[in-house]
Structure formats: structure tokens, C-alpha cells
Amino acid sequence: MIAYGFCIDERYVLPALVTIGSLAETLRPVERRQAAIRVLTLDLTRQHAATLGEVVRRAGFGSFRLRWAAPPRGAVMADTDYISVTAYLRFAFTPEFVERPYLIYLDADTLVVDNLAAPFNRLREGQLGLVPDEFNPCIGYRGQALPGLADDRPELRGLPYFNAGMWWTTPSALHTIREGVCSALRTGKRYIFHNDQDALNLWAASTAGVVTAVDAPYNRFELARFLECSDWPRRYTSRAAYPTDTAVLHFVGSAKPWLPGCPPTDDVRLYRTALDRTLRMVDRLGDHSISAPRFRGPHE
């Protein structure tokens, strides 16, 4: 039995609903009934919390819980272009809140296209599964992953650097992760550029054997919309823009697929189809405070 965790603020209510809907479509009805949705938030209104709970219920999930929480003390926000301090709430999950033997955490700018449970086959109790970051795969890479750390601690150069957008873990690891991140925030603030992700990687780099690498398809960056504008991603990866083994599409960066200015790639059109389904459900619930442009037609 798996709990799926989300950290949601008012800006990401609708994208989170899209992600939850896509997750539901990858699970059999019995799996949805056994699964739990767990949400942590800083600022979600009571109305949006109620809408979220009703969407989860209609999707067939067996359990829903939401809790208002606060980020850890000393949370560093070096990059605030499209990210808020809500991202730090991923460290506030507790076993009592999760209430399931397994936890998968998902960022709200993802689209699930295949079952997510397989990585648990490689994890031991108390471990954390993460996917190496496609654009910054190791510490010291191009100076962007924990900038300055490899100069001060050369023994860490080349260690894996992970994207924090997807987690696989057991509740017994949550306290260790939270304490490790808090320690990293106290001692390594000068190395943090990618906010909570860098704090997590600071802890992971100093804690051998606790993090297990998960295969790339389980946190696949959506490249095609970047390649529509420039070939800069080719400095980091040569893989196909549309691989066939993707389990999770992660729409990193500021050009989010629910925004009108996002290039309409095949993956973006797939997302917008899911977005339209979600908006129709929200309309039926009567919550007119949640809205977005409607994307229809072959060129959208």
C-alpha cells in the first residue's frame, strides 16, 4: 500500500490536480482504493482543500489527508524564478501522517504516464530512491550542482547529484532525511543554489548508502519544448526528445505546459488533454476560482 505525497500552494492547485488525475489513470481500480493521497501546504484555502479532497475521492483513491505545515528553519531560497518555499515542505512528511508502508513523493509539475511502484524493488527499508538530475548529473558538473562544494571538498566531486522532484522511500527514513537536511542548511548554506534540492543533495553526499539511484524514465525531463527554442539541452543530454520508456514527464523550468506561452510539443499537448479533463471535473464541482486557458485543437 502506497501513499503519494504532494506539496501544494495556491499557485499549483490546478497542476497538482492534473498530476493526481494522471496518476489515477496509471493505477488499476483496486490499486487506487488501496492508495492514499497526502498533501502538505502552506497557504491552501479551505475551499481549494475541499475541492482537492473531492477530486481525489472521485478519482477512486481510498484515503486523503491534508495538513498545513511550515518549512524547516533556515530554509534557503536562492532561486525564486518559479519556485516557492513550499518546496521545502517535502521534508515535513511524517510516518504518522503518511500511514502507509511506502511513500512516493511527486512534484506538481509532473505528468504520470506509467505505474510508479517498480523502483521499490531496489530499495531497502530506510532508503531513499532518487533519479540523477539530467542536466546536472553529478556534484561539480559544470559548476552548477552545489556550486563551490567540489572545490572545498574535492572528495565529493563526481558523486551523483539527484533531482528532488520524485521520491521513493519508507516512512522510517523520513526523520533521518529531515534531520539531515536541517543539518545541511545549518552548515552548507553557501553551497545552495537550487534551494531544497541542494539541501537534500548536501545531506545525500555526506551519507553513504542511504540514497539509491532510480532509473531515468521515472523522472524524465520534457526536452522538446526547450528544443523548440534552442539546442542548449544538447550540452547536457543527447537522448531522444520523445523516448518510449517514460514513466513520469517532469516539466522543469518556467515554461509550464498550463501556461499559454509554452511551446505546444507532443508532450505538452498530452498534458493539456489531461488539463482539460481536470478543468471539466472542477467545473462540475462548481469551484470557479480554479481556472486556466482551454487548449483545444491540433495546433494547441
Image (tube, rainbow, N blue to C red):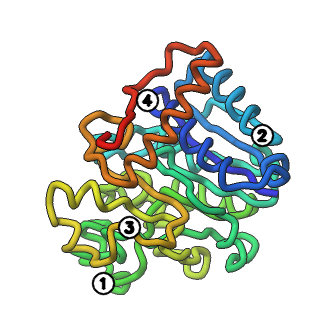
- Mark toward the start of the polypeptide (1 vs 3): 1
The residue at the point 52 percent across, 13 percent down is 288
Circle 2 or circle 1, nearest the eye: 2
Mark 1 residue element: helix
What is the distance, in whole Å, between disc 2 and disc 3 at their CAs? 30 Å
- Mark toward the start of the polypeptide (2 vs 4): 4
Amino acid type at circle 1 is: Pro
The residue at the point 64 percent across, 28 percent down is 52
- Mark toward the start of the polypeptide (2 vs 3): 2
The residue at the point 76 percent across, 33 percent down is 57
Quadrant hosting residue 103: bottom right
Circle 1 or circle 3, nearest the eye: 3
Task: Say few, some or many: other residues with alpha carbon within 10 Å of mark 1 (under 14 / 14 to 19 / 20 or more).
Answer: few
Q: Which residue is mark 1?
A: 154
Q: Which residue is mark 2?
A: 60
Amino acid type at circle 2 is: Gly
Quadrant hosting residue 116: bottom right
Q: Is residue 139 above or below residue 276?
A: below
- Mark toward the start of the polypeptide (2 vs 1): 2
Q: Relative to residue 295, is residue 229 drawn left or right? A: left
Q: Which residue is mark 3?
A: 242
Number of residue marks: 4
